Image: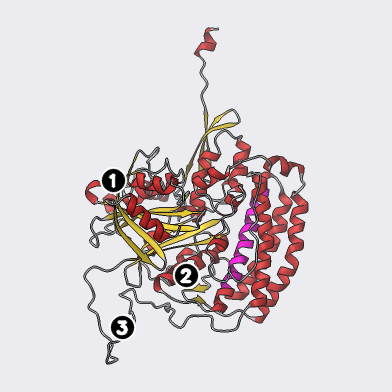
Amino acid sequence: MGPNEVAAALKKAFPSDVMEIKEFQAQVGITIKKDRVKEILRYLHDSPGMEFQYLSDLCGVDYLGKREPRFEVVYHLYSMKNKTAIRIKALVPESELAIDSVVDVWSGANWRERECFDMFGITFNNHPDLRRLLMPDDWDGFPLCKDYPLQSDLKEREWKGYKETIETAERNKVHGVRS
Amino acid sequence: MMLEKELKTKYLSVSMGPQHPATHGVLRLMLDLDGETVVKCTPHIGYLHRGMEKMGENMTYPMAMALVNRLDYVAGVSNEIGFCLAAEKLLNIEVPERAQYIRTMTAEMARICSHIIWLATHAIDIGAMTVFLYSMRDREALLDLFDMLCGARLLHIYPRIGGVRCDVSKEFLEGLWNFTERFPKLIEEYETLIDQNRIWLQRTKGIGVISPEQAINMGLTGPTLRGSGISYDIRKVAPYDAYDKVEFDVPLGKNCDTYDRYRCRMEEFRQSNRIIRQCIEKLPEGPILAADAPGLDMSPGPLKKPAPASAEGVPVVSSPSATPAFDEIYVATEVPKGELGYYLVGDGTGKPYRMRIRTPSFVHIAALQKLCEGVLVADVIALIGTIDIVLGECDR
């Protein structure tokens, strides 16, 4: 079953959820509504003939001011049986920043969903352990959003951990400890 | 009697890392111990988080090359090739055949380098010192060859979008050929040291068993997956560069344990050696860079696309649309540690709109949590070694 056939079968099985099918450089991307994302992905994982048992990647994309709804959660699936790769994109609006977790389907999704939460602030419903992953626990803001600056002087909004380090360095200077 | 009732069993929490020789970088594991047995393992990562994805989105495609080789710094050139392939597919650039062969050759050199580091550190963690000295000696020869090729030993920035930076010299090819003549003997040397070593066998056989279903579900890739007997190698299933023009086998494990993963990687040494020899033999003549490859001074502004010619031969200038069309591409390559995927979203400018890097180490460390449950503390060390991680790649 090639990617185009998978897309057609998915459109047939979930006619009201599949929004758009786009092909570029022989890679097929299917845009879906987020409400039944888990059901759709479970269908792709389980149904005979498809068997997308392998989750290559899961990530978020922020289309601030370029597209509506603003966020997308992108799943890259691979079927070892058919040697087919497919991309599923679930639309997540800014007003309702949550999507169902797929950890039950692929346990490998666990950390990647955490990372997506860490970087974009998208909540994953029913996730077993949704905490910050790469950033410190007390970090403020979501770095990969397009309205988050690449470089800036945060002054008093600076991260607590960094402020503490600077203060310690200042204190050590008084005692003549070389930094 | 009363006293015993009052006493309670409490798990001992031990923080392993972030500064620990066996964690291969800055990985911290919180281990809850019941005696010698691990009840719960919680990995903490992010100590090496440099915001590579964010930085990549603010750079032009050629500039990001100097960024991505800092992912897996023991096999820098593999990361660069993966990024080049993704950018080439997005910008629609055809790579000349000679460059494809050179890339394949260097990628396999990087694979040998990376596997040597893995073997050396894995062996030293488990307690075999000599292998470390022997294998690091041989890695030096390869690093010298890289130096000869492009003037850098670790962070090469050798491939370019559309080809490679400079051509290979005759001396380099001779040096590499001599190395491949020598290398099979050296692999045997490592094997005589540990293959039948009783301590090595006891510490690896039957340790860290990952069932095939579990491995797929967790998303493991590379030799870590193939040790569980699943034949999934991107070089075979979706060949890139010159991998469809060379012959090689994909070694598989049977017992899904640490020892089989060790055997897989040892066989990969031989296969890489084979690929390099074929590349040198078959290396075609021709250009090394595509004519339409973007220069290093690529503009971050909108890309010039060849406008469709009108009937009179005057190109039609299409008005820029208000909403840019986004092109997306996901390209996976087989790096020494597993599947390295780049997901690029292009908006028609010289910078990627979104650059996502899917790294094998990240997925493998996520799996560590499950693998460590119920094993002995000493085996945690073996497990970290066997999944072959680099923290630069994990934290990005």
Kindly identify the residue that appears in the image at 60 percent across and 52 percent down: B226
How did the renderer colour the structure? secondary structure
User: In this picture, which residue range is highlighted in magenta?
Assistant: B102-124
- Per the image, label 1 sits on a secondary structure element best described as loop
Q: Is residue A165 left or right of residue B42?
A: left
Percent x, y of residue B328: 37, 64
On whether residue B149 falls in the magenta region, the answer is: no
Percent x, y of residue B162: 47, 76
- Per the image, label 3 sits on a secondary structure element best described as loop
Kindly identify the residue that appears in the image at 41 percent across and 68 percent down: A25
The residue indicated by pointer 1 is A35
**Which amino acid lies under the numbered mark 3 shown in the image of this protein?**
Pro
Disc 1 from disc 2: Cα separation: 36 Å
Look at the image and tell me in which quarter the N terminus of chain B lies: top right
Disc 3 from disc 2: Cα separation: 27 Å
Residue B75, above or below B360: below
Circle 3/circle 1 CB separation < 8 Å: no
Any mark on residue B308, and which? 3
Task: Please give the chain letter of the residue carrying mark 3.
Answer: B
